[in-house]
Structure formats: structure tokens, C-alpha cells
Amino acid sequence: MNIQDILEEILSEKKDQNKDGANDFDDVKIARMKASGMSDDEIKKKHPELFESDNPHPGQYKAPQGSKRDKQLDATKADLKSGDPERVARAYRRREKMEKKERGKKGFKSKPRPDTKKETVRMSEAQLRDIIREVLSEELSAATKATLKKKAEKRGLTPGSVYAEFKKGLAAWASSGSRKGMSQHQWAHARVNSATPSKSWAVVKKSKAKKKKKK
């Protein structure tokens, strides 16, 4: 039996190779790799973007199970988890490309936040490396720290906890997703703005520093 016969046999027996509820080109790719001798585990490890994750994304991310956006976010999460520098860089490029595409769609509206870092429409390789380095090293720029410190003081939060919340936002944008069209820094600032000590997902803390009384 030749490869073509094996491929046709696999497709006829089980069309939905990745169990995402659809019979599409992703299934053909998986079937071809199986026909070449690759195991299911090998295929999943090398091409996680072809398979459906069991964990659904929050509704506001607009990434329903089995959708292209869902698969892209799942693939990004797998790339980041790998720890491989090349895959990590690929993950950030994919996320930037995804949101840039959304911002370019007709009718997309996004009011810029005054506290959000301005970014170019197209991220350069140098900018990409800076952002990845910032997330991995957990170091924030002086300008970003100054902005976050003002937020902390205004809301009575500790600066350190606000920095930590912002970093979580930077990482979450890449690994988990965001609302369509939002840049990484926009998402991180949005997380800080909505975080309170009472929310289970937040790490911000109330400051114990007493305000000086005006004479």
C-alpha cells in the first residue's frame, strides 16, 4: 500500500482528525503526517496549532472553540510554554499579526488610552525583541514604571503590586489572548485599570502608607 492509499484510508475512516467538529484542511495535514509514519503525540508536539484545546477562551476574546483565532491562541500558548527562544519569538509575532489584522478591518474602532504606550502599526524585529526581553526578564522601562506609579498612588495601591499586575497583563496578552485588536501594552494597562484587591485574579495590594495631612 502506497502513501496515497494510506492517506485515503485514514481520511475515509476518520475525517475529523483533530476532533474540532469540522472536516477541513487541518485534518488533511494531520492525515498526511500520519501516513508518513508520525504518531499522534509527535504531530501534536510539532504542530499544536492543528489541534483543539479543551480549555475555552473567555467570551470577550471572541475566540470560540474550533475557530481559527482559538487555534492560533492555543498554538501561541504551546510555543511560549516550550521555552524555545525561536518558538517564543514566533508566538509574539503571531499575536502581533493577529491583532494588527483585527485593527485593519473596516469598522474597527479603538479609542487610544492616554496612559497606553504608543506603538507603531508594524512591530519591528528590534521592538519585538525588546518586548520579549521585558516580559522574560520582568523588567519594565522607566517611563512605564512612572505611569504605573502614578496609577498606584491615585488608587491607594502599592507600586510593586501594580508593576506585577502590569507584567501579568503583558504575559497574558501573549499566552491567553485579549480583546480583538488590542496591543500588548493596551491589554496590560487595561488589566491594571480593572484590578482591585477583592478580585481573585488580581495581585494588586492596598498601600498602608498614610497620606500627609495638609496644614
Image (spheres, rainbow, N blue to C red):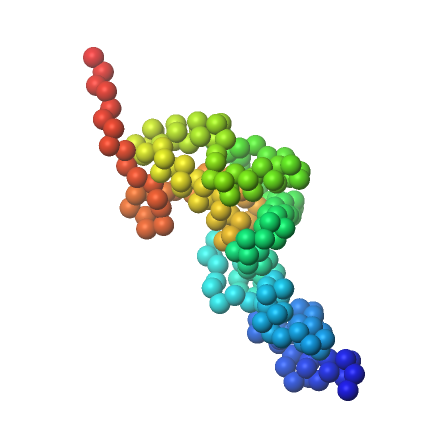
Q: Position of residue 62 (x, y in %)?
A: 53, 56
Q: Position of residue 29 (x, y in %)?
A: 69, 70
How many labels, in total?
0
Q: Is residue 196 above or below residue 212?
A: below
Q: In this rendering, would 207 be left or right of 29?
A: left
Q: Is residue 16 above or below residue 182?
A: below
Residue beneath the point at 63% across and 69% down: 43
- Most extreme residue toward the top is 215
Q: Quadrant of the N terminus?
A: bottom right
Q: Quadrant of the C terminus?
A: top left
To which quarter of the image does residue 168 belong? top left
Residue beneath the point at 38% across and 37% down: 162
Q: Nearer the viewer, residue 91 or 98?
A: 91
- Most extreme residue toward the front is 84
- Most extreme residue toward the bottom is 1
Q: Is residue 64 above or below residue 161?
A: below
Residue beneath the point at 41% across and 36% down: 163
Q: Nearer the viewer, residue 118 or 159?
A: 159
Q: In this rendering, would 90 be left or right of 142?
A: right
Q: Position of residue 38 (x, y in %)?
A: 66, 74
Residue 141 in view, yes or no: yes
Q: Is residue 111 above or below residue 35?
A: above
To which quarter of the image does residue 209 belong? top left
Residue beneath the point at 36% across and 50% down: 201
Q: Position of residue 88 (x, y in %)?
A: 58, 50
Residue 21 in view, yes or no: no
